[in-house]
């Protein structure tokens, strides 16, 4: 339950081994022109000095609250931990390496007060430090004045025409639980919170979404990445259960199939990287998700396509209709991938031998 002694805005920042960026990120919060906020940091038992850094900041500014929890490895677990401690009437989120402009909170707060919207989205920049021409998402196609219904916001978010970093009324987060079986389950929750919002509006102020941190959880690949399929499947079922247009539902239905194909393919190539137990767990999850899909809906998706795209989807249907056919098809893909891999290795060795021969000839 949210604390009755609320401030205007709670900023939640999960932290794990973030010492490289933490100073800049926290300073961008403390430099806000809007002052009535709290910054709530949850350290996931960092092994660097991140916890000491946020404690030092908290000792100097009472608006910073610090918690430490046993390592859970994923942000959804930190969300579930922190929600009862957030006192703000509205809540926003940022990672330990993101930055926000000085007017970020002020513009979102004012826009929320002006419109009564449950969700306000500022400008968002895909941030690479030192790069002058970073891409951005501003309103809807550059229009900050439009006001979206909940369904419009969900649909525009499916291919990220609008982003998910914003200010949300704390009431729509009450009693919500972030699924902890996938590291990106917040992508599902973002759409669910859009759907729970009375309306979604836009404001000035900028969220700098860092892209050049190679150690970020979204930039590394491991067993966790296979289970993002669960998030895609949940989103598909959410759209279906809430009666979104068939065209929209079919698109997510096919996205689940694409994910199964992609992840099965990757798991075959990386079989030696995962442990035997992990590999078995991955394959079971892929098969279980496959079996939950109504194969006949494959054709529904094809009907929304034209020409060669429709033909490719219909042909694909025959490989996906039966799991044993699918496995046989994927085995052929695996053989093709391995052949290409071996050719690349052979080509690399050939180039090395040629370059070595040239150097020896030149030295003689």
Image: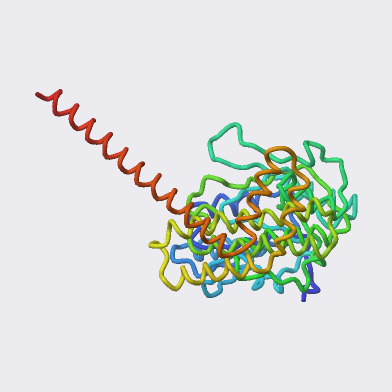
The N terminus, quarter of image? bottom right
Residue 180, quarter of picture: bottom right
Relative to 289, say whether 263 is above or below.
above
Residue 359, quarter of picture: top left
Q: Position of residue 280 (x, y in %)?
A: 48, 71
The C terminus, quarter of image? top left
Q: Residue at x 64, y 55 (%)?
A: 318
* 121 to the left or right of 329: right
Q: Looking at this view, is 335 or 267 the one in front?
A: 335
Q: Position of residue 328 (x, y in %)?
A: 51, 59
Q: Position of residue 70 (x, y in %)?
A: 53, 75
* 330 to the left or right of 27: left
Residue 270, quarter of picture: bottom left
Q: Residue at x 72, y 52 (%)?
A: 164
Q: Looking at this view, is 14 or 27 the one in front?
A: 14
Relative to 88, say whether 96 is above or below.
above
Q: Looking at this view, is 247 or 63 the one in front?
A: 247
Q: Position of residue 49 (x, y in %)?
A: 46, 63
């Amino acid at each position: 339950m949210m604390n009755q002694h609320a401030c205007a805005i709670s900023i939640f920042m999960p932290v794990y081994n973030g010492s490289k960026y933490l100073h800049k990120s926290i300073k961008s919060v403390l430099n806000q022109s809007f002052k009535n906020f709290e910054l709530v940091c949850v350290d996931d038992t960092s092994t660097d000095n991140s916890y000491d850094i946020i404690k030092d900041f908290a000792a100097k500014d009472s608006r910073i609250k610090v918690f430490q929890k046993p390592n859970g490895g994923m942000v959804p677990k930190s969300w579930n931990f922190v929600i009862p401690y957030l006192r703000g009437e509205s809540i926003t989120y940022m990672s330990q390496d993101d930055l926000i402009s000085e007017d970020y909170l002020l513009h979102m707060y004012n826009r929320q007060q002006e419109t009564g919207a449950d969700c306000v989205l500022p400008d968002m920049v895909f941030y690479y430090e030192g790069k002058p021409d970073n891409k951005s998402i501003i309103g809807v196609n550059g229009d900050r004045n439009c006001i979206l219904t909940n369904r419009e916001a969900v649909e525009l978010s499916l291919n990220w025409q609008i982003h998910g970093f914003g200010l949300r009324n704390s009431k729509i987060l009450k009693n919500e639980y972030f699924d902890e079986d996938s590291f990106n389950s917040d992508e599902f929750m973002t759409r669910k919170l859009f759907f729970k919002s009375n309306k979604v509006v836009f404001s000035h102020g900028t969220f700098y979404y860092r892209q050049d941190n190679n150690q970020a959880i979204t930039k590394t690949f491991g067993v966790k990445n296979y289970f993002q399929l669960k998030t895609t499947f949940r989103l598909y079922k959410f759209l279906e259960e809430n009666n979104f247009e068939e065209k929209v539902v079919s698109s997510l239905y096919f996205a689940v199939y694409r994910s199964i194909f992609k992840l099965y393919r990757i798991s075959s190539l990386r079989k030696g990287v995962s442990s035997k137990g992990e590999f078995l767990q991955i394959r079971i999850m892929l098969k279980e998700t496959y079996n939950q899909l109504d194969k006949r809906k494959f054709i529904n998706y094809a009907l929304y396509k034209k020409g060669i795209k429709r033909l490719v989807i219909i042909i694909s249907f025959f490989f996906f209709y039966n799991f044993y056919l699918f496995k046989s098809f994927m085995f052929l893909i695996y053989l093709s991938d391995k052949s290409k891999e071996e050719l690349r290795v052979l080509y690399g060795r050939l180039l090395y031998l040629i370059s070595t021969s040239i150097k020896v000839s030149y030295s003689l």
